[in-house]
Amino acid sequence: MARSTVTIICSVFLVGLLLGPLIFLINFSGLSLSLSNSDIAAIKFTFVQAAYSATLSTILAIPVAKALLRQNFWGKRFVVLILGAPFILPVIVAVLGLILVFGNNGIVNNLLNLIGLGSVKIYGFWGVILAHVFFNLPLAIRILLQALNDVPGEHYRLVSSLKLSFTQNFLALEWPVLKKVCPGIWAVIFAICLSSFAVALTLGGGPKATTVELAIYQSFFYDLDFSKAAQLALVQIVLVFGVVVASQFIVKPKTVFGLDIKISNHNLSDFQKIIDTVVIIITLLFIFTPILVIFFYGFADVFSLPPSVFKAASLSIQIAILSSFLSVFLGLCLATNMGEIFGSLGIAISPIVMGAGTFLMLKNFGNPYLLAVPVTAMVNALVSLPFVIRILKPSAIEIRTEFENLSRSVGLNGIYWVWWVFLRRLKRQIGFSLGVASALSMGDLGVIVLFGSGEIATLPLKIYQLMGSYRVDEALASALLLSLLAFGSFALFDKLGRAL
Amino acid sequence: MIRFEDVIIEIGEFRLAANMTVPKGFTSVIGQSGAGKSTLLSALSGHRPLTSGKIFVDETRIDLLSPNKRPCSIIFQEFNLFPHLSIVQNLNLVCGNKFFVSESSREKIKRVLEKVGIVELIDRLPSEMSGGQQSRAALARALLQRNPILLLDEPFSALGPNQKSELIHLVDNLSKEQDITVLLITHDPKDAQQIAGHCLVLKDQSVLGPFETSVALDEDGPLKGYL
């Protein structure tokens, strides 16, 4: 079968999977056309929080990326590498960590109280922003550092030889890079934050801090207003798709896999060195303290967790395996320029609506709860698909170009070509994307909240339930277990991809 | 016998015309860089479409066939082997079972590798072999394909003179033994000189010949000005 045929079949299948549930939902419930005040408030909040999160993450990333570029220290490569950790850290774990650091009785508020200052509030608007900055600041730093790193060393030497002022230096070296890269970073983060669910569910909520995605969940789960859920899902598609289309007109930042850090010729004053060091330390504290406190507080109880937690962990593992293999299979079929466009639809369609529509469709055929695992796996696979395609596509295109003549000359095509060339040459990227997809699925607190019941609960849902019933110690230990599973599955698949 | 009938190949501003019959045996294709030597072989092997004209092999029209259906094997200047596959896996791609290397395929591959003198390297990766050994492996695969035409697109250009000469003679011997028509691209007339075959000369956007190699290399021959 020709490659383009595979891409077309997969794209049609994907569009069916993504839009089918929504169409069914609209068909089932009809479509409400008027927006209530609370809907408008949710849309407004979604936009405002995404804009704040994207702007803060982008602005804060600039001094950190510059400091990391200028300073050379032992472990710098590791620090840059580990900045990728929040991306695969389960949201519920990060939220718990952030509560321990910034919550009412958290480390920061205790310190502030000690010196007689007011306290910070983790719940509501600023809590959502804080969590989004926590997740997206490292992403922004890595992209920006890569861009700054791409400036040839000769430029730095030239500028330093001209003895320019601070402003002239900035305009000559950094401004052209920032101007080119920052809009793209902002757009990526804005799009990610638009469909925020788990953060809003745990730290937001209430009329003043509800995102559209959360409102969809509430309509479906609490109000049983399917028509409203479908209407909000359409709003969500328009919002996210609009941003995705608009971002195509902005220069896209490069995908970051690894960073080739160069030592540049910077003549820094002692003051600048101190400032850079402080900036790096504060950033590392901000990003890693919430992770470390989970390890610190969760460790004691991890061995005495109730069996229900391990049962939930087992379900999470099953879903993660199913979902990551499905996502990578689709990713391999869609690793073309056209395929990427269809694959990216996963960002625009609400996972809750995908789950809800499927739930209602399945209801016609029997008990939908019986299919909770495959449906959750499928939705998780579609959610991680845009990232998987982003990882696979560049190398897939390179392989096709590089080995086209040779493959044709030996008559190697179709499934044989996939077996001998495509899969073998792509195994590192396949391992990496399986790792990312499994970690994202492992930590997902999305569609499972619809299917989740006492019997069917993944580990993130179990943690959410434990938090809700104030069993904090068990929640922390479970969060540690979840982090280990997420990082462990990522490391395992990544290692397998390299070793095979 | 390969017959080019009113063949025109155009790539942007570049144009190449070919109207000739290539006899059986060893034929060198000579011309300056950019004259269209590789383009001619690509058209014959099906990697490049013709703008117009027809190509026949023993009265069978082949220019409408896909590359893997044409009776040609081709060895390129570089990238002749998949770097992640061992030699036996590389050669197995043109044998019967394509999902794994069967015992019978391995035996068949061994016999061909013996002919090209590298049977002991059967399980090596291309990166663990010298350029000359890689060329021999590519030649072995071409022999396994059992096509009546072998196209060599400067595959030995990166080798030293001795190695190159050795391989040209090996190809010549094997082609005689197996009755294969060989077209060898070279920009070095000395390569053509080694084999008493025929010669195609690419000049002024046209393919001239075939000439007997001795005639082509004569002082007043078609390669005048090139030598």
Image (spheres, rainbow, N blue to C red):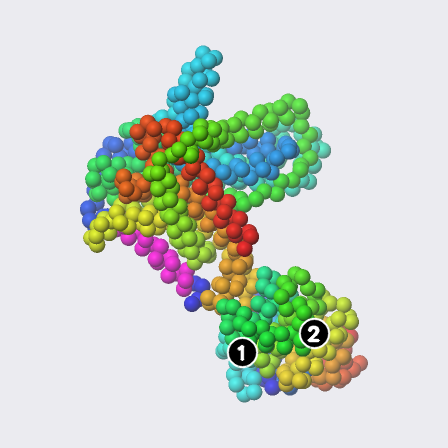
The numbered dot on residue B70 is: 1
Specify the quadrant that holds the C terminus of chain A: bottom right
Q: Residue A159, can we see it?
A: yes
Q: Quadrant of residue A352?
A: top left
Q: Residue at x 44, y 14 (%)?
A: A113
Specify the quadrant that holds the N terminus of chain A: bottom left
Q: Residue A446, can we see it?
A: no
Q: Is residue A417 left or right of residue A462?
A: right
Nearer the observer: mark 1 or 2; the answer is 2
Q: Residue at x 60, y 80 (%)?
A: B149
The amino acid type found where label 1 is placed reads Arg
Q: Count all numbered tags in the image, as a single digit.
A: 2
Along the line of sight, the residue nearer the viewer: A64 or B144: B144
Kindly identify which residue carries mark 2.
Answer: B117
Along the line of sight, the residue nearer the viewer: A122 or B54: A122
What percent of the width, then of the height, locates residue A490?
48, 45
* Residue A429 lies in the magenta-colored region: no
Q: Which residues are magenta?
A: A5-23
Q: Chain of mark 1?
A: B
The amino acid type found where label 2 is placed reads Gly
Relative to residue B137, is residue A452 depicted above or below?
Answer: above
Q: Quadrant of residue B27?
A: bottom right
Q: Residue at x 52, y 27 (%)?
A: A285
Q: Residue at x 57, y 35 (%)?
A: A79
Q: Are marks 1 and 2 in contact (CB under 8 Å)?
A: no
